[in-house]
Amino acid sequence: MPKNAPALAVLTAGVAALLLLLGGCGSESSGPVARSIRTISAHPDITIDHVTGGLHSVQQEANIAMEKTRNPGAGGDLQPLHAAAFVKPVGEYRTYSEREAKGAQRSVTALQADLRAGDVAAAKRDWLDAYDHYLGLGAAYGALGTLDEEIDGNPGRLPGGTRSPEFTGLHRIEMGLWTGEAPARLIAPAAYLTAKVDRLQTVVRTIEIDPLTYATRAHEILEDAQRDMLSDVDAPWSGAGLRATANSLAATEFVIKTLRPLLNGRDSTIEPVDNELARFHAVLMGVRREDGGEWPSLAALTRLQHERIDGTLGSLLQRLDDVPGALEVQRTRPVPTIAEQKREKQ
Amino acid sequence: MSEIDRRSFLKRAGGVGLGGLAAGYGLGAATTEARADESPEQAAQRVNEVELSTTRDFDGVHQAGILTPAADFSAFLALDSIAGGQAELITALQAISSRARELTRGGAFPLTEYDAPPADSGTLGPSIAPDGLTVTVAFGASLFDDRYGLGPRRPRHLTAMTAFPHDNLDPARTGGDVLLQITAGHQDTVDHAVRELVKPVRAELAPRWTVAGFSGARRGPSPHSSKRNHFGFRDGTSNPDVTDPKAMDRLVWAEKSGGEPAWTVDGTYQVVRAIRMHVEFWDRVGLHEQEEMIGRKRDTGAPLGGEGEFENPRYDLDPEGERIGLDAHIRLANPREPRTIDQRILRRAWNYSEGFDAAGQLDVGLLFVAFNQDIARQFVAIQERLNEEPMVDYVTPEGGGYFFAPRASRDPSDWVGSGLFA
């Protein structure tokens, strides 16, 4: 999970692409434009006269970018949003998180009872429920401090891996349940987990998520799913990667729902996002239907199922990454050059 | 030309290396200087011949492959010792040095009986071109456990590599008793060496993991421009000067005092990290944010607000991080402050590409290598500063290890690691 998305304003995709052309030559005088066009080709004999995928020549693109840098907001660029616009979406997400945290609390309490009773089948069911609810907090992880690692940490980050005494939380219990460990040995880790999930209740009530972080979560929750869950890194013993991805999708759908009023009319971002969300949703539900209404483990997926899931998720992510750009809050100030800072110091 | 003739010829010609002069192996004398009367194909062929005939001495004081300019292709091969005792282990290490020395020199190999398997796989043809091959032998901390009685001789700063907070180390791709770093100018030379080196030691050294690396072509704009990694950024811009023996004594070679066992003199600690790079995710990040995370321009490699790749980023002028963020990668990795001068490492890096992962994502990354005098003082201190950099979301270290690369073999009768058993 991205724990600390950089808190900086994201340029719109177009300007960002054009910075490539302007890179390294400053942006204040008219001279560097022509020079920068030459420097995009390392080879002096190769001239690049068209920007791939664009409608303008390199010269036109560069001119437009220069104008935007000198005169932010001109040329039909989006007006930056006021940070206050995010109060309502983040508030709605907070309420959603509180509900999920409560759900997680119920599940881990039940899990503890199952382990005491030695009922492994029930413990597995309750473990999966707890994991489901915890993943609903996807947009809030960065605000949870050390609790996230304590509840959901993976062993790979610990010296000693699975043998580390610090390996605890959900995945410690997952390892035990799915590798045939005696339930009695999991009671202590479950008690620890319960204490942490209890604490989670108070933490989520007061979480603050800054606007850019919240907008960035629109794609980062599912970036994590693709990186860690569909590759079987995050929940290797239970094989619950697909179920976890479905939960991450649900959290993303909720984030988009809260941002919808802000996205309407901004760069036509929302329509393709909605289409891709619906398509990925349909693919996941189709897989579940094919498996009799249960989430299959990753290992049980057919090649075609896996390919369709990976493909539609990749395509969805390529739409979701437009969201932070469309919701930029403050324009990035021009970065001072070394030369300017030298002059300032004198 | 005999072996001795060839070597003295090389010395007269001003040593080894690209841009020098080399000969042998039926390739004829070659030079990289442009000639007016030749076609591009002829010129390319001539440069190819120079590259293929480059030799790096296996014997000497320091092992080749450390201060040597990074070759374009590499492979890292970690081996677990299954030798039954010290004598068997020694035999295997001798065999590694002996075969490695032959391969780095090149030349024709002896033909055996026509109905017997040939002495060499033949993948490089009947006469092996040296191609700048280096084979660097190093030992992991696990070799110094109780199996071979080497415990008391463990290099003072050598430990197993433990995970940092954002690592996801796969034990099957981490550690190992013996590490071979193999580098050369072409991939087939590296692959050939791997195949030839494991062959004589099958009963003693079992392959544990391997990763193959490559670097980008020299795409300029200058011959010194650093090559790019999978994120599209230039990699390895800031490195200590390997031609400065004082700096190397301070940063790379094992301390001559301070409790290091005598056999470690002229050796160095080697850190290897296979760092997966989540490039699909990275490609969905705005260029501006990418550059802020790194602290450099993607196209030129210049520090933000600067003009050229090798310009000093001048953090002194930017104490608040207005130009280069305080958590930018280059700033955390090397803050260029007096207190961090002794933390610098000699850094080498190759890209790797291993296909796709289970989720259909490109399994590509960076083979990061650091040579340093004291892993805790240098590599670990730097890595701990990088624990919370924003880039951690886009990379996952998955394997590698800490090793100690001893001094080189003195001459062809010696072998790398002999000092450990003396």
Image: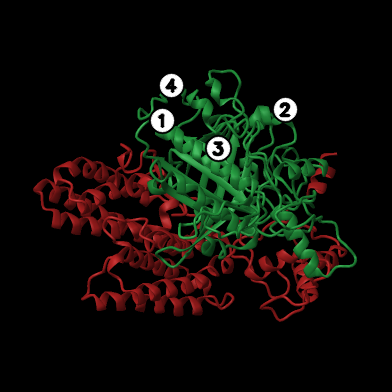
Chain identifier for the red-coloured part of the image = A
How far apart, in angstroms, are the residues tagged by discs 3 and 4? 20 Å
**Counting other residues with Cα less than 10 Å from the Cα at mark 1, is it few (<14), some (14-19), or many (20 or more)?**
few
Q: Position of residue B301 (x, y in %)?
A: 72, 54
Residue at the right extreme?
B36
Q: Earlier in the sequence, mark 2 or mark 4?
A: 4
**Counting other residues with Cα less than 10 Å from the Cα at mark 4, is it few (<14), some (14-19), or many (20 or more)?**
few
Q: Which mark is residue B246?
A: 2
* Marks 4 and 1 in Cβ contact (< 8 Å): no
Q: Earlier in the sequence, mark 2 or mark 3?
A: 2
Look at label 4 and name its amino acid: Pro
* Marks 2 and 4 in Cβ contact (< 8 Å): no
Q: Which mark is residue B73?
A: none
Residue corresponding to mark 3: B270
Q: Is residue B86 left or right of residue A80?
A: left
Q: Earlier in the sequence, mark 4 or mark 1?
A: 1
How far apart, in angstroms, are the residues tagged by discs 2 and 4? 29 Å
Q: To which chain does the residue with label 3 belong? A: B
Evaluate whether label 1 is on the same chain as label 2. Answer: yes
Q: Secondary structure at mark 3?
A: strand
Nearest to viewer (mark 1 / mark 2): 1
Q: Which mark is residue B87?
A: 1
Foreground pick, A145 / B178: B178
Q: To which chain does the residue with label 2 belong? A: B
- What residue lies at 46% left-to-right and 45% top-to-bottom? B200
Chain identifier for the green-coloured part of the image = B
Q: To which chain does the residue with label 1 belong? A: B
Evaluate whether label 2 is on the same chain as label 3. Answer: yes
How far apart, in angstroms, are the residues tagged by discs 3 and 1? 26 Å
